[in-house]
Each structure stands twice: as structure tokens, then as C-alpha cells.
Image (spheres, grey):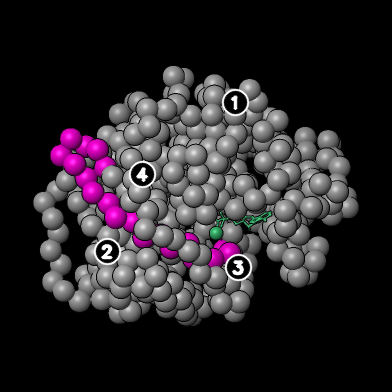
Amino acid sequence: MIVVGCISGTSVDGIDVAVAELDGAADGRLLLRPLGAHTHSWSPATREALLALLPPATTTAAEVCRLDVVAGREIAEAVASAIDDFAGGSADLVVSHGQTVHHWVDGTTAHGGLQLGQPAAIVERTGLPVVSDVRSRDIAAGGQGAPLAGTLDLLLLRGLSRAGALLNLGGIANVSVASPSGVAAFDTGPANCLIDAAVSAATSGTQRYDADGRLAAAGTIDAQLLERLLAEPYYALPAPKSTGRELFTTDYLASYECDVELADLVATLTELTAVTVADALRPYGVTDVYGSGGGVRNPVLMDRLAIHLAPARLTTSDALGLPVDDKEGYLMALIGYLTWHGIPGVLTGPDGRALTGAATPRVLGRISPGDKPLRLPEPGVTPRSLRVVD
Ligand SMILES: Nc1ncnc2c1ncn2[C@@H]1O[C@H](COP(=O)(O)OP(=O)(O)O)[C@@H](O)[C@H]1O
Ligand SMILES: [Mg+2]
């Protein structure tokens, strides 16, 4: 079946849409054929309004309602153009993650989360059934609801019979690990969100990120500040764990009273990401790390990561068949395919619990019917592996 997956990550930079043909075999081998993907920018007004909603800001129910509708309409346009561009105008299912505006966690306990982007707008625009709200069921079962990337990443590694770790460098960094020392999927901490916040604040929003790592390259790491930042308790929590911009807020750095030049601050925050990712992966002894997400476009971040991860080799998810910018869109397509077939969207960990920490893996999401009567297929087989095919 042809599934359109879409998500806007914690960076709130755009709606990633990917179209995939997915086919499951009775023996548990799942095939994913990427048909194409693009990132559809949020309109500047919507982006500003979404960012203005994030903690530590306060908001109103009226603004949450308005943005749910407006975001839903923009996602609907992004989905419709992807169906035209990559699927010849027709698809079977849409999976929309929406924009996370709150991830409610307390230590290693997740209580809930809220994603905006009304699925009804997508149904109205495309006529297709839409799977949305993909995190809540896992959280209700005691899981983190995040990161969900472990499902795609680990099935992909199994399909290639490889050990290793996948690392997504979005606003937050998450890893999926399969090694002789363990299997896990968790958020390590910030990837780009603190860098973006520092650059935006210092330039009054004229620059939103450290383009090509130029500031970090010009700066010097402030060892004392780095040490203070590394004392953040989140890094020492055991997996499974997840985090977001509720902890790493735009004014997170203000509490550190760091009176350093912007370039030095950005160099230090870039190092913070590299060190926290490498520290999180070290116990697993992986030999290969495959990066994805916008952070792989930052050469300083990639250089520092390569240094701290050594002797493990750092490449990108392209080496596994999934382009760095498109992996999260394809992840959503996979999650929706699983839901449609009544299959849990999270894998089982070594202890029998879901990798997210839920009691057992659950079927994720809510289904909004499309224009045709909703007819679900017979439940499918839980996949053992996934292969990306041309
Ligand atoms: N050329 C680049 N140089 C440095 N950083 C970049 C570059 N391109 C993208 N980024 C970083 O990647 C982020 C977006 O990554 P993305 O994977 O879309 O994150 P998310 O999943 O949170 O939306 C940007 O906010 C920016 O920090
Ligand atoms: Mg993004």
C-alpha cells in the first residue's frame, strides 16, 4: 500500500513528508520502497506562533485551537502536494504526527504529550484516512511515547544483519542501538535546539541556526561552561527516557549565566551535543553510527562527534538506504502502516517490555476515516526486519 508519512520535529523548521510503498510478507519481512520526500516550510506566521507556544511561554486555549486548525491546513497542503509529486495523485493512507507543543515528562516517567495539526483538515483535503496522535497509547501503557525511531531503525539494522546505532540530530538527539551489549532507543539530550536558541537570541531571530557550523568553527570551547552544562541530571538517567523543549527551553541557558561570546557559546553547545551523544552510546560498544536529521549538515558537529565516538565510525543513514532528511517521514509512514494492520508500533525490548518502557508494545494512534467507509485489512504479521528496496 502507498502511505504518506509526515512530521514536524522539535526544531519547528518545516513539515517533512515522505511517500512510501510498504509491503509485508507473511514471514515477517517488510519491504519499504521510498517514492519521494520533501520538506514543506511552515508559513513564517505559523512557525512564529508555534514557537511562541513552547515553554516557558504561556498561552490560551483560543490560541491552541487556532494553531491546531492552521497547522492542520498547512500539513494538509504539504501532504496533498507530496501525493501529486511522488504518488501520481493517489495514495492509501496518511500518517500525520503533527507538531509537538508539549511533551510532559517527569524524570523517566512520561505522562502525556500534545501534537497540533488537526487530522480532519488532512482528511478534508485528501479524502484519505489519517492516522494521528501516534504517541499517546504508548504513554498510556507506561512508555515514553518517544523516540519512535527505534522501530524503523532497528528493523532496518536487522534487515541488513548489522549491529550499530542510528542517531537522529534534530532539535533533540535520539539514538537506536543494536549491539551485543544491548538494544535500546532513547533521547540523549539536545542536538540542535540549544544551538538554535543561542543563535536566534543573539541575532534577534535574523539567524536561526549555526549555518554550516561557521560560528562553532570560529569559537573556542569554554571548558568550565561545558562542565557545568554536563551536570544536567537528564544525561545520567537510565534508558528508556525522553526529553524535549520543556527542559531545553529557549531560556535554559539563561540560568547558567554564561557570559561568553556567541561563537564560544555555540562551540561549547556543539561540543555538549557531541559529548552527550558519545557518552550515551559508549556503554553499547557500537562500531558504526549512522547519523540523520539537520545536524548532519553541521560539519563541526559531525567532526566533534566523530572524534568522541571513535573508534566507532560515523557515517549517515544514506549508507542504509534512507536519506538523512527523509528518515523521520518514512518512520511515520511505517508507524501508520503498522497501525493499519493492527500491529504494535514499538518493538519488544530484551526484558519483554516495549523499547519505550511500555508494559508491552501497543498498536499506536487514532484513525480518522476518509471519504470511503473505513475498512481495515486482516491483522498483519509483526515484522522481524525491514528492507529498503528501489
Ligand atoms: N546547513 C546546516 N548547518 C548547520 N545546522 C543545520 C544545517 N541545516 C540544518 N541544520 C540544523 O538542523 C535543524 C533541523 O533539523 P531537523 O532534522 O529538521 O530537526 P527536527 O526533526 O527537530 O525538525 C535546524 O534547526 C538546524 O539547527
Ligand atoms: Mg525539521
Which element is circle 4 on? strand
In space, the residues marked 2 and 1 are separated at their CA atoms by 39 Å
In space, the residues marked 1 and 3 are separated at their CA atoms by 36 Å
The residue labelled by disc 3 is 51
- What is the crowding at mark 4: few (fewer than 14 residues within 10 Å), some, or many (at least 20)? some
Quadrant housing residue 289: top right
Residue 365 placement (x, y as % from top left)? 30, 57
Identify the residue shown where x is 30% and y is 29%.
352
Which element is circle 2 on? strand
Q: Earlier in the sequence, mark 2 or mark 1?
A: 2
Residue 388: which numbered mark, if any? 4
Quadrant housing residue 26: top left
Q: Earlier in the sequence, mark 2 or mark 4?
A: 2
Q: Where does ligand 1 appear, by image quarter? A: bottom right
Magenta stretch: give its range.
12-30
Labels 3 and 4 touching (C-beta < 8 A): no
Residue 358 visible, this angle? no
